[in-house]
Image: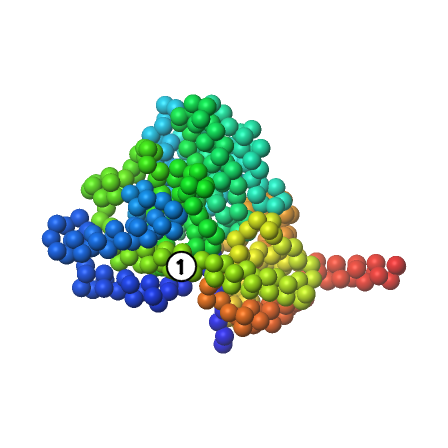
Amino acid sequence: MRRVYLDNSATTPVDPRVVEAMLPYLTEKFGNASSVHFYGQEARVALDRARREVATLINARPNELVFLSGGTEANNLAIRGIVESNVEHGRHIITSNIEHSAVRGVCDALEKRGWEVTRLPVYEEGVVRLEDVRAALRPDTALITLMLANNEIGTIQPVAEIGALVRQERERGRKYLWLHTDAVQAAGRMPVDVETLGCDLLSLSAHKLHAPKGAGALYVRRSVRLTPQSLGGHQERERRAGTESVPLLVAFGKAAALAREEMTDRIEHLARLRDQFEIGVEARVADIVFNGDRERRLPHLSNISFRFIEGEGLLINLDMQGVAVSTGSACSSGSLEPSPVIRAIGRDDELARGSIRFSLGKDTTAEDIAYVLEVLPRAVENLRRLSPLYQKSLAERACEIKTA
Ligand SMILES: Cc1ncc(COP(=O)(O)O)c(C=O)c1O
């Protein structure tokens, strides 16, 4: 059976060039980067190179990066670290209602501990509005945390515009207002430049960039003080204690370098296949709705709601035919709640439950897309045939045509 992986927003296949780069650090180059001897220095040199490579991807300085275990830890360190070191300057946080659970969960926890959180709406297009951010700003706002691009619908948020707003506030003398952005989905799929964005903190994850799971980074602008969330050794300039995983971070560095070198080609390839996919679906399947703004979005992702269908059913049906996709619903966590992101863009329960995320990768081919376009309409048709609501709607439509 042919297998097509269209779940690159969940994780990406590891690039063989990345595996090759990391392998020596799993075998003969096993040193601890904090050791003074030859083995340690070998690891340190590799770690420094990886740091330069990841920093270059986002136009940061190497010493502004904290290496850690992934996007979740980066978001935790960013938000907790900044608010805990600014308790006396303000306890208000601005965020959106479509953040990844790693941001949402931290904000919810802080709220229980006495912080106030404003969750901005994203409207039908799935994008936060600058005027809402401006209106939500208070004298006690310590942090704005807003993802650069959404993981379910791919919409790109106005982080650079908010960065400019924060800069203006600073020019007016405001000292304690920070901007964090979760760039886990965006990195490698659009240019990410911390200077253009004007952010103070930015989260990255290696496994969305064709490196293995278990590595990530937090960009921390020099001058920003963070309360570390893990205490122990002096690693990572005392911002994240614990022996660095040299092989995983070497892999991250290599993946970042490749992402930068190949960015233009990858974006062009992804957008072309994504468009081919969407045009094909639109021509073959009726009663669908595309979710999220179709201009202001990442090039690799298409989120579609199929009426009269449960997304989970379609996911399983496609999986049986070798096509891997994902639903936005929280079913995987044991709950049948429809996706909060799809609800946040104003879709009703039916559309939220019937939404599927197709996320392409640099290795997706035109043949893969052609195969999906062959099996998807059949799978949708089969599921709809079982739906009494669909049958009723067909009957109603037939009636309308007759009456007309
Ligand atoms: C936007 C976003 N932030 C954070 C994360 C968490 O990253 P990690 O899996 O590296 O913990 C993800 C992963 O899906 C994500 O999509």
Asked whether 273 or 164 is in front, the reply is 164
User: Which residue appears at 42% of the width and 29% of the height?
Assistant: 177
Residue under pointer 1: 261
Q: Residue 93 in the image: x percent, y percent?
A: 46, 32
Disc 1 residue type (three-letter): Glu
Label 1 element class: helix
Q: Quadrant of residue 302?
A: bottom right
Q: Is residue 145 above or below residue 269?
A: above
User: Which residue appears at 19% of the width and 61% of the height?
Assistant: 29
Q: Quadrant of residue 384?
A: bottom right
User: Which residue appears at 78% of the width and 62% of the height?
Assistant: 395
Q: Residue 385 in the image: x percent, y percent?
A: 68, 66
Q: Is residue 230 above or below residue 169?
A: below
Q: Residue 314 in the image: x percent, y percent?
A: 57, 63
Q: Quadrant of residue 167?
A: top left
Let me know if residue 260 appears in the view: yes
Q: Is residue 236 left or right of residue 99?
A: left
Q: Quadrant of the C terminus?
A: bottom right
